[in-house]
Each structure stands twice: as structure tokens, then as C-alpha cells.
Amino acid sequence: MSRIAREAVVRAVVKVQGMGFAEKQRLADELFHAQPHVLASVLVQGRLGVSVEKMDFLLGLVLVAFQAMNESGLTWPLITEDEQERRMTRLLEAIRFREALPEERRAEVMMDYVRSHPEQELLAFVYAEATRWLQRLVPEESDNYVMLAALNFVDCIAYVPLPEATAAVQRGSSSDADGGQPSAPRSKAAHDPAWPEPQFLQEGHFQCARMIRRALP
């Protein structure tokens, strides 16, 4: 089940996009104290040839994701360098696997990935923003590092082990935890026409994956 509800992601997007420079600086300071390794993964981009403007775009994605963590109401553990490296290794393996498939199978595998991801809502936001961003700029090889860092943070959020007490609270808050009826699935488009459609996510995933794959050894 998702750790961060769609509503929490939406609140995070609205709050961060409505912040001024001073407010974003305070949130970045909070990120530094709570998740220093995540902020470091943004700052290191300069050594990889990423421009300040593109680092700013990445920081914007990371701040939204971090605010979504805050909005979730969960207690989050420290995301360590080891966890980041572990998730990055799996992310690159998944990209290589999909890109090695015949062209006609990639769409199916891509959508399976999106639908099965634990944090679909946060992933949807990152893909939507990244796709629009890629369409606005002249591509550079260093853009791959920006995309990988953003996607890796989403994966860390999805898979980092939660403290047992927090995990128990999350299980207890699920719709059928007390034997109740699970809530019926709802159509994103029916409730919010601006939310990215699956086809848009698929196209965004293709574009991001192709871009990253070109830089892989």
C-alpha cells in the first residue's frame, strides 16, 4: 500500500509551489536536518556537470517529495547512503532490463512498473514534471543524473524500512484494518482532470528511460 496518499502529495505540491525563496530555504534547512544524504544527492550534481538552474529544478522535486513525507503524518527513518546506493542499483537494473526488451513489449512493462509502484501518486508527479521539463530544454548528458536522483528519492521513500511503530500505525489506518470494507478505487481523471493520465505517465517514462539508458555503460 502507498505510504503517502494522493491528497498528501497534492497538499505538498500546492504548498511548495506557493512558497517564496525564504520559505523554500527554510524547508531545505529542514530537509538537511532530517535527510542530509538526500540533500547531498542534490548538491553533488554540480560535480557531475549539472548547471545551477537544473539543480534548482531537482531541488524543487525533492522539496515536494520531502513535504509529501511531512504531510503523510508518518515518522520517517534516516535515508542512508547505503539505502540510496541500493535503490539506485535496482533502478538502473530495471531500466536496463526494460530497454533490452523488444520495442513492442516495452509499453506493457512500463505501465506494469507504474501501476505496481508503491508510491504511484508521487511517481506521477515526478514523471509529469520531468516530462515537461525535458520538453523545454536542450538535452545534455548531465540531465540523466538529475532524472536518476529524482527517481531514486521516490524509490527510497517507497522502500526504506519504516520503524515498526510507524509501520503498525500505517497498517492500522488502512481501510480494511478493522474488518471494514475497503474503499472503492477511484478514477484520478474523474476527480481531478489536471492529474496526469496513465498514457502521459507512460510517455514520460519512455522519454526518461530512453534518456537515462543512453548514458548507461
Image: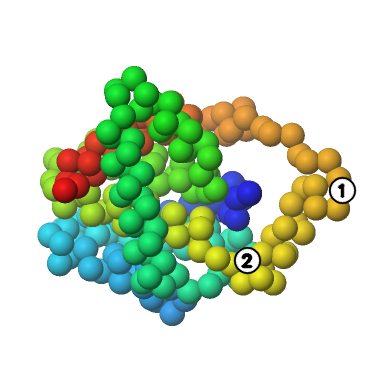
The CA span between labels 1 and 2 is 22 Å
**Residue 191 at x, y = what percent?**
62, 32
Question: Secondary structure beneath disc 2?
Answer: loop
Tag 2: Cα neighbours inside 10 Å, few (<14), some, or many (≥20)? some
Q: Earlier in the sequence, mark 1 or mark 2?
A: 2
Task: Give the residue drawn at x 24%, y 59%.
Answer: 55
Question: Secondary structure beneath disc 1?
Answer: loop
In the image, 199: left or right of 137? Answer: right
User: What type is the residue that disc 1 sits on?
Assistant: Gly
Tell me which corner region of the image, top left, top right, bottom left or bottom right, holds residue 72: bottom right
The residue that disc 1 covers is: 179
Q: Nearer the viewer, mark 1 or mark 2?
A: 1
In the image, 158: left or right of 146? Answer: right
- Furthest-top residue in this view: 104
User: Is residue 67 in view from this perspective?
Assistant: no
Instruction: Pick whichever, 100 or 130, lies toward us.
Output: 100
The residue that disc 2 covers is: 74
Instruction: Pick whichever, 212 or 22, lies toward us.
Output: 212
**Residue 74 at x, y = what percent?**
62, 66
In the image, 91: left or right of 49? Answer: right
Task: Give the residue drawn at x 38%, y 75%.
Answer: 36
**Residue 216 at x, y = what percent?**
19, 47
Task: Give the residue drawn at x 30%, y 71%.
Answer: 40
**Residue 95 at x, y = what percent?**
32, 42
Task: Give the residue drawn at x 59%, y 67%.
Answer: 162
In the image, 76: left or right of 128? Answer: right
Above or below 54: residue 35? below
User: Is residue 186 in view from this perspective?
Assistant: yes
Look at the image and name its color scheme. rainbow
Tell me which corner region of the image, top left, top right, bottom left or bottom right, holds residue 134: top left
User: What type is the residue that disc 2 sits on?
Assistant: Leu
- Furthest-bottom residue in this view: 33
